Structure formats: C-alpha cells, structure tokens
Amino acid sequence: MGLYKYIRNLWKKNKEVYSDYLVEWRREPSTLRIEKPTRIDRARELGYKAKQGIIVVRQRVIRGGHTRPQLHTKGGRRSKHNGMRLNLDKSYQIIAEERANKKFLNCEVLNSYFLAKDGKYYWYEVILADKSHPAIINDKDIGWISTPKQTGRAFRGLTSAGRRSRSLRRKTVNVVLSKR
C-alpha cells in the first residue's frame, strides 16, 4: 500500500485520531484558513496541490434543524407556527462550501471533504483556488477554474457535493440476477 492509503485507513478506523483535535477546533472561529490539509490523502484526491493560489479552509457548521427567519412575529399570530423548522435540500457540506466562499470572495471552491462531527458541530475542509493567481491560471489541471463561466460554483451546485444533492453524480447500481 502507498502512504496515502495508510493515512486513509488510520483516519477511518481510529476515531481517537481526530477526537483530540475537536477540543481545539471548538474554540476556533467557524471559518479558519489553515496552512495544510488535516487529511492530506482526501485533499489530494479532490484536487489539492501544495502551491500558491490554493488555500484550505476548515469550516464549522452547527448541527440541527434549520429554522425559517421570522419576519413578522409580532402579536396576532399563533406561536406554534413561529418557530417552524425546515428540512432544507442543502447538506451540511454544501452549507460549509457556501460559507467558506462568502468569506474568501476572490476564490472559487474546488471541492470539500468531511473531517469530523460531534453532538453540536460538523467540520469540513474546503479547498479554494484563487482564480486570478498566475500559478492557477497556468496550471493545466486546475486552470479551468479561472474562466469567467466558473464563478459561484458553490452557490450554483457545481461542486461535487452540490451535484450529489441535485442527483447528477453517477451511482453504481448492482444488479442481482436471480436464477430460476
């Protein structure tokens, strides 16, 4: 096995690997730029390169139901309907990508991956590319992200998580043929 496969197996099998990190991550701000990915194996699979113009952001998203904003909840309305919970079509990963993109306006979301969760939060790492950086424009693998057509990928559902929520990712279907 290669190095990245050992790292992947260690991360998947050992919950203690990231449980020590959770204590620190809870104290950090919800959007934090980090120097290098925590899960280097997963980041490399999704297009991360250790070069200028690519940044990694650890994004924290609170768990639980999403509530509708209360616009006019002054008197005369039934209190039962004021705290209406919604089941949004967005996953926590999409919300994390959008929030990271709002924080770093000059960057475009390349991809993201799951880090950890506890009773209150989900953590994702979002890979962002600076679309105006010369190193990104001249890169043959990720240069396509610099085109004007690629603005707002996270908000338009064009990342991997967004395509999954829109049912555009190909799913492998196992067909079982029964013998009669």
Image (cartoon, rainbow, N blue to C red):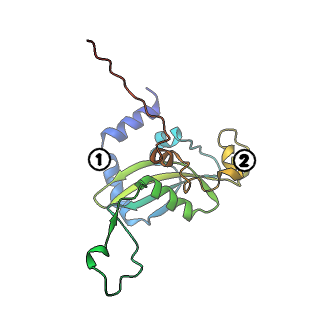
The amino acid sitting under disc 2 is: Ile
Point out which mark residue 137 bears: 2
Location of the C terminus by quadrant is top left
Q: Which residue is located at x 58 percent, y 62 percent?
A: 104
Q: Give the x, y percent position of residue 20.
A: 32, 53
Viewer-nearest residue: 137 or 55: 137
Secondary structure of the residue carrying tag 1 is helix
Name the N-terminal-most of marks 2 and 1: 1
Q: Would residue 62 appear left or right of 44 to someone viewing this image?
A: left
Residue 122 versus residue 113 in the image, above or below: below
Residue 1 vs 113, above or below: the answer is above
Q: Position of residue 21 (x, y in %)?
A: 36, 54
Hey, which residue is sitting farthest bottom in the picture? 75
Q: Please state which of residues 21 and 138 is positioned toward the viewer in this rendering.
A: 138
Q: Residues within 10 Å of mark 2 (few under 14, many from 20)?
A: some
Tell me how far mark 2 sits from mark 1, CA to CA.
40 Å
Quick check: can you spot residue 160? yes
Q: Residue under circle 1?
A: 16
Point out residue 107 in the picture as x, y percentages from the top left corner: 62, 57
Quadrant of image for the N terminus: top left
Instruction: Report the mark closest to the observer, 2 or 1.
Output: 2
Residue sticking out furthest to the top: 180
Q: Is residue 50 left or right of residue 13?
A: right
Closer-to-camera residue (153/46): 153
Left or right placement of residue 17 versus residue 132 in this view: left
Determine the residue positioned at 31% across, 52% down.
Answer: 19
Which numbered disc covers residue 168? none
Identify the residue at image location x=69%, y=50%: 146
**What residue type is disc 1 on?**
Glu
Could you tell me residue 14's position as x and y percent? 30, 41
